[in-house]
Image: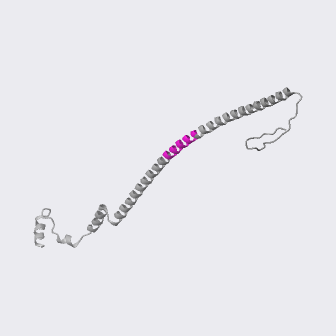
């Protein structure tokens, strides 16, 4: 029995060793086992490195796509904003023109109402002519123009006053 003691005098464990018939075979098996384990670990490591490289490429590809999408999104937002401003300005201009047209129509309506209330010059002339077409008492009192009258009518006109 093999016992291991240290300065602190505690026992790590004990086990029984048996004598082997061919110690070189045991050492060869141990070395082969260690080499197989090392080969398996190297294969796993290579596989993990390849997987890591693939994931890194995928990560870079996704990051590149995201950057492209972000820049495309920014360009799209800028374009949409410009179009929105353009449409908004067109609508404002249309509203202003419609407002101006409405004001003009309202002004015309006011002018038409004002013209209906106050007679026009031609209406006043027509009304005056209608009034003055009839004879009045004043006309009989106004002496006729002496230059157009004959001498006898002039004498009679002078005495009429």
On the picture, is 36 further left or further right than 158?
right
On the picture, is 85 further left or further right than 140?
right
Question: Residue 64 or 150: which is nearer the viewer?
Answer: 64
Residue 45 vs 12, above or below: the answer is above
User: At 40% across and 55% down in the image, what residue appears?
Assistant: 100
**Rendered image coloring scheme:** one colour
Residue 145 vs 78, above or below: the answer is below
Residue 11 vs 45, above or below: the answer is below
User: On the rendered image, what quadrant is the C terminus found in?
Assistant: bottom left
Q: Position of residue 153 (x, y in %)?
A: 13, 67
Of all residues shown, which one is farthest toward the right?
Answer: 21
The part of the chain drawn in magenta is 67-82
Toward which corner of the image does residue 128 lie, by quadrant?
A: bottom left
The chief SS type of the magenta part is helix
Toward which corner of the image does residue 5 lie, by quadrant?
A: top right
User: At 57% across and 39% down in the image, what residue appears?
Assistant: 67
Question: Residue 86 or 10: which is nearer the viewer?
Answer: 10
Q: Position of residue 158 (x, y in %)?
A: 10, 70
User: At 84% across and 29% down in the image, what residue appears?
Assistant: 26
User: At 47% across and 48% down in the image, what residue appears?
Assistant: 85
**Residue 91 part of the magenta segment:** no
User: On the rendered image, what quadrant is the N terminus found in?
Assistant: top right
């Amino acid at each position: 029995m093999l016992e291991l003691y240290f300065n602190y005098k505690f026992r790590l464990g004990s086990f029984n060793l048996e004598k082997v018939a061919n110690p070189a075979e045991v050492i060869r098996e141990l070395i082969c086992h260690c080499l197989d384990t090392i080969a398996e670990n190297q294969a796993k490591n290579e596989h993990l490195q390849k997987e890591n490289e693939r994931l890194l490429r995928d990560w870079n590809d996704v990051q590149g796509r995201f950057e492209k999408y972000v820049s495309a999104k920014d360009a799209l937002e800028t374009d949409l904003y410009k179009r929105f401003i353009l449409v908004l300005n067109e609508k404002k201009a249309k509203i202003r023109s419609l407002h101006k047209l409405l004001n003009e129509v309202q002004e015309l309506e006011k002018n038409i109402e004002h013209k209906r209330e106050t007679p026009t010059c031609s209406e006043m002339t027509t009304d005056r002519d209608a009034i003055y077409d009839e004879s009045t008492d004043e006309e009989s009192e106004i002496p006729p123009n002496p230059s157009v009258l004959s001498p006898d009518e002039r004498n009679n006109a002078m005495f009429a006053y």
